[in-house]
Image: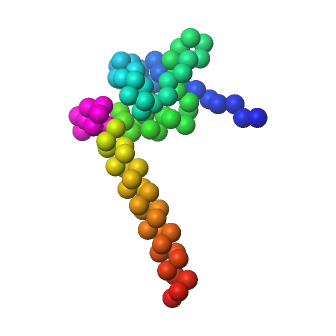
Amino acid sequence: MSTKNYIFLDDFCEYHSIKLSFINELGEHELLKITRQSSRPCIPEEQVPLLEQMVRLHRDLDINIPGIEVALNLINELENHKRRILELENRLKRFE
């Protein structure tokens, strides 16, 4: 059985110089699954890259939370299309 590692949000906020209220808003919009360990808010370690991506979208591009949601959906769609194109290219190679 594997154990999940969690990242405490107050530590994440301090490291990235962001407010906890921003992350709480992401949780309210269901863009992030926030849980509690030792009565401190935290996220599973595997969500850290997603959270860092959302922080960059907000900080670097000044995108608000609804905009972040749209951007993430578009990025996800693009990745799905890329995967599908690779799959189709591989199928085509069999006929060459």
**Which residue occupies 43% across, 30% down?**
30
**Which residue occupies 50% across, 69% down?**
87
**Which residue occupies 55% across, 83% down?**
94
Residue farthest top in this picture: 39
Image quadrant assignment for residue 54: top left
Residue farthest bottom in this picture: 96
Span shown in magenta:
56-68
Q: Position of residue 53 (x, y in %)?
A: 39, 39
- Residue 85 relative to residue 59: left or right: right
**Which scheme is used to colour this image of the protein?**
rainbow
Residue farthest front in this picture: 29
- Quarter of the image that includes the N terminus: top right
**Which residue occupies 41% across, 50% down?**
76
Residue 8 in view, yes or no: no
Residue farthest right in this picture: 1
Does residue 59 show up magenta in the picture?
A: yes
Please determine whether, in this image, residue 17 is positioned above or below residue 71: above
Q: Main secondary structure of the magenta part?
A: helix
- Residue 17 relative to residue 4: left or right: left
Please determine whether, in this image, residue 3 is positioned above or below residue 41: below
Q: Position of residue 85 (x, y in %)?
A: 44, 68
Please determine whether, in this image, residue 8 is positioned above or below residue 61: above
Does residue 29 show up magenta in the picture?
A: no
The number of discs equals 0
Q: Position of residue 93 (x, y in %)?
A: 51, 81
Image quadrant assignment for residue 2: top right
- In the image, 89 versus 60, the foreground residue is 89
- Residue 45 relative to residue 26: left or right: right
Q: Position of residue 86 (x, y in %)?
A: 47, 68
- Residue 26 relative to residue 43: left or right: left
